[in-house]
Image (cartoon, rainbow, N blue to C red):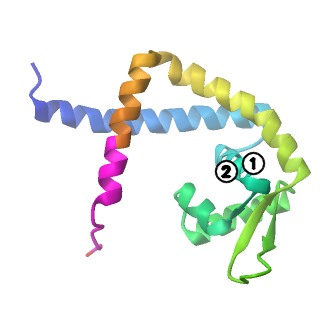
Amino acid sequence: MDSPCDTRHHAWPLFLKTHSLLVDRLDADLQAATGLPLTWFDVLVHVAAAPNQRVRMNELSESLLLSKSGITRLVDRMVAADLITRSSCASDRRVVYANLTTRGRDVFNKAAPIAARGVQEHFARYLGREGERVLVAILSRVIDAQSCAPTRSAG
């Protein structure tokens, strides 16, 4: 029988491997069907769900766990592909918004059912309702604990 320590050592690598496999699979599904990388789809999800289909760049960066420079480079490529535009805030010049274009909305509408099908096929079907409830509870506890924990400086 595994000791609790052994079980913990199995859970973390399994979590990381599962995440990596699912991200790769969902990315491949989306790219094959639409040519859209998963990272771009994630941006479209956030912008499409925002009021007036526009979101502050700093909020987008936080939601997607990207640095400011990382989100800027990603948005630059999506602007070049005519999926989103940038706009400034009239009352605060420091604020920049990412806005969904008509083409971005069309691409999002095509990609969303493919992504949903991929999540169901590659992930959700293995959980069942009870498994999903348990996983949500566990991951929420981890997120809540980390959100409240002081950050450690590198060094």
In screen coordinates, is 14 left or right of 113? Answer: left
Residue 103 is one of the magenta-drawn residues? no
In this image, 6 relative to 61: left or right?
left
Write down the residue under mark 2. 46
Q: Which residues are magenta?
A: 141-154
Secondary structure category for the residue under label 1: helix
Indicate yes or no whether the magenta region holds residue 144: yes
Query: Between 55 and 17, which is closer to the camera in this rendering?
Result: 55
Q: Quick check: 44 above or below 67? A: above
Q: What amino acid is labelled 2 in the image?
A: His
User: In the image, residue 36 lies at what x, y percent?
Assistant: 75, 43
Crowdedness near tag 1: few (<14), some (14–19) or many (≥20) residues, C-alpha within 10 Å: many
On the image, the x and y values in percent for residue 33 come to: 78, 31
Q: In the rendered view of the protein, which quadrant contains the C terminus?
A: bottom left
Q: CA distance from mark 1 to mark 2?
A: 6 Å
Instruction: Please say if 118 is above or below 144.
Output: above
- Residue lying at 32% horizontally and 42% vertically, measured from the top left: 141
Task: Name the quadrant containing residue 94.
Answer: bottom right
Horizontally, residue 4 falls left or right of residue 15, namely left
| Kind of residue sitting beneath label 1 | Ala
Q: Residue at x 46, y 37 (%)?
A: 19
Report the residue that reaches farthest toward the right. Answer: 102
Asked where in the image residue 82 lies, by quadrant, the reply is bottom right
Task: Say which quadrant the N terminus sits in.
Answer: top left
Q: Are marks 1 and 2 in contact (CB under 8 Å)?
A: yes
The residue where tag 1 is placed is 48
Question: Number of marks in the image?
Answer: 2
Residue 10 placed where, x, y %?
24, 32
